[in-house]
Image: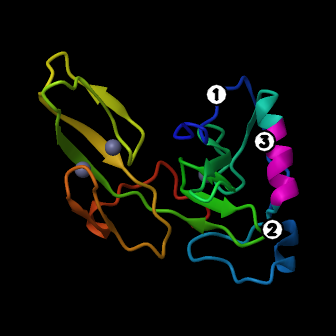
Amino acid sequence: MPLHSGFRRPPPRCQRARTDATSAAASPLPPAEAVKAHAPYAEPDWQRDALQQSQGAQLACPDCGSCLNYGPRWHARADGTERHYRACKVCGFWQEADGSQPYRVWLPVHTCTIQLRPDQCVFHCPVCSTTTGSEQAGAQITHECGKYLAPWETGYVCRNCSTSLGPRDAKRFQSDGSG
Ligand SMILES: [Zn+2]
Ligand SMILES: [Zn+2]
Ligand SMILES: [Zn+2]
């Protein structure tokens, strides 16, 4: 399953990402709100980053400079293709590898309550990929559930517990980045 495929293994060293705001003027799109202009990011850039990451490099977020949770990511689409993008979970900097300008995601978080089935001890959350569970089958369990949303996504309904999430539920990122 590709659920964890976008997450990187902990690598040993930190290096600055090469891309920065130097050639932002080349992009045909205006900068997204709350993110400074960045260099266009396209498939060859993503391939380069993915190769460096697979060789153990820890890339730095071009927006906030953190090495803690940034890198090229990928997810399998339903049609069999792969979505390629880069993302920083410290400041919310997100950019598709299609030449478009970056944006800053927001993160609604809630305490998600799940009733395990009578024969079920483990729950793998399809929203946040957290695995939780109980020694007691059929127990009621909770976990903190967060979902990264693009600025144009105004909210969502949790598919586990039907809670409606919106801007009031947004958790602040560790860093404001350039925004
Ligand atoms: Zn960042
Ligand atoms: Zn929920
Ligand atoms: Zn969850």
Which three-letter amino acid code belongs to the residue tagged 3?
A: Ala
Residue at label 3?
Answer: 50
The magenta segment is 43-51
Q: Secondary structure at mark 2?
A: loop
The label number, if any, that marks residue 40 in the structure image: 2
Taking 59 as reference, is 10 above or below it? above
Q: Secondary structure at mark 1?
A: loop
Mark 3–mark 1 distance (CA, rounded to whole Å)? 12 Å
Task: Between residue 170 and residue 127, name the one nearer to us.
Answer: 127
Mark 2–mark 3 distance (CA, rounded to whole Å)? 16 Å
Q: Residue 157 occupies which quadrant of the picture?
A: bottom left
Which three-letter amino acid code belongs to the residue tagged 1?
A: Arg
**First reached walking from the N terminus: tag 2 or tag 1:** 1
Which three-letter amino acid code belongs to the residue tagged 2?
A: Pro
Residue 144 horizontal/vertical position (percent): 28, 41
- Mark 1 is surrounded, within 10 Å at the Cα level, by few (under 14), some (14 to 19) or many (20 or more) other residues, namely few
Residue 35, magenta (yes or no): no
The label number, if any, that marks residue 9 in the structure image: 1
- Residue 140 can be seen, yes or no: yes
Identify the image quadrant of the C terminus: bottom right
Identify the image quadrant of the N terminus: top right
- Mark 3 is surrounded, within 10 Å at the Cα level, by few (under 14), some (14 to 19) or many (20 or more) other residues, namely many
Q: Which residue is pictured at 60% across the width and 50% down the height? A: 88
Taking 68 as reference, is 32 above or below it? below
**First reached walking from the N terminus: tag 3 or tag 1:** 1
Mark 2–mark 1 distance (CA, rounded to whole Å)? 26 Å
Residue 37 horizontal/vertical position (percent): 72, 72
